[in-house]
Image: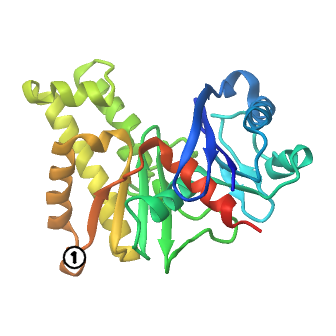
Amino acid sequence: MRIAAIDIGGTAIKFGAADGCGNVAELGECPTEAKRDGGQGVVRKVLDILSSLAPFDRVGISTGGVVNAADGSIFYANENIPGYTGTQLRTLVQEQYPVPVAVLNDVHAAALGEAQFGAGRGVSDFLCLTYGTGVGGAVFAHGGLVTGKHGASGHLGHIIIHDGGKLCGCGGHGCYEAYASVTALCALVQERVGETLDGRQIFARMDGEPELAHAVSDWTDEVVTGLVSLIQAFDPERVILGGGIFNESRLMEDLLIRLRGRVMPLFRDIQVVRAALGNRAGLLGAAYAASIVK
């Protein structure tokens, strides 16, 4: 089976030819240019990519935004992809390629990829969170992805950890991602030391700069605060943490120590691990979803 797999992000679209069994070839990437071209431009790029991957038997698409699982449309998307809300993505693809098409949210796709081929393999109940520009999430329970009534389950970045707190990109206040995303870390560092640094630069310099170290420590507390609530609410067997920031071994070690000290004793045996598939998780999850869609 040849599956055209596409992962639509706010800045780049990744793609490849997959088999639904964890293998992907003909990997490619192109800029999304969504701010310039909007949702219609993204659709045009998807159709062009599919043309380059043809022939294929199925299509799997991972995309930012809230996906209506029933019809593969974009129920809601923020301004990272202007004009994307309401796009009938599955229908538009099937008008040109009459094959089975799976469309799912990007973090749902990543969780599905990790479940089948990565850090969630063999685990029936886990949480998957990705930390970057925001905080994305997915819930895997009883061996399957929890999608919810609107296909929007897993917005773990929007649990409230500070009532009336910082403004979040969703329009609410006090959301987890407003405090625990890498964007939030960089903003905190900017506020404390007056420099614009990315996550890698922050960790490279923090040993010799106490203000940076204090900012990272305060940010880590926010990450842990959300995880404590989520672990005690869901009682998962495993928590999978995605995002390049968790390649910092010192961060993982510190986070685990703090987490074990704050959760109820009942939950201290829960495994907290790094995601295993990196930026291939969405592609592999989308391909797997396509392999089983009817």
How many numbered discs?
A: 1
Q: Is residue 157 visible?
A: yes
- The residue at the point 28 percent across, 62 percent down is 272
Q: Say above or below: 116 vs 110.
A: below
* Secondary structure beneath label 1: loop
Residue bearing the label numbered 1: 264
- The residue at the point 59 percent across, 29 percent down is 29
Q: Say above or below: 232 vs 71.
A: below
Q: Residue furthest top?
A: 195
Q: Nearer the viewer, residue 52 or 208?
A: 52
Q: Position of residue 241 (x, y in %)?
A: 35, 54
Q: Quadrant of the N terminus?
A: bottom right
Q: Say above or below: 208 vs 179.
A: above
| Amino acid of disc 1 | Met
Q: Nearer the viewer, residue 185 or 115?
A: 115
Q: Quadrant of the C terminus?
A: bottom right
Q: Is residue 172 visible?
A: no
- The residue at the point 47 percent across, 41 percent down is 279
- The residue at the point 21 percent across, 50 percent down is 252
Q: Within 10 Å of the Cα at label 1, are there few (<14), some (14-19), or many (20+) other Cα atoms? A: few
Q: What color scheme is it?
A: rainbow
Q: Nearer the viewer, residue 226 or 117?
A: 117
Q: Position of residue 56 (x, y in %)?
A: 76, 47
Q: Position of residue 188 (x, y in %)?
A: 30, 32
Q: Position of residue 105 (x, y in %)?
A: 62, 53
In this rendering, would 156 be left or right of 252?
Answer: right
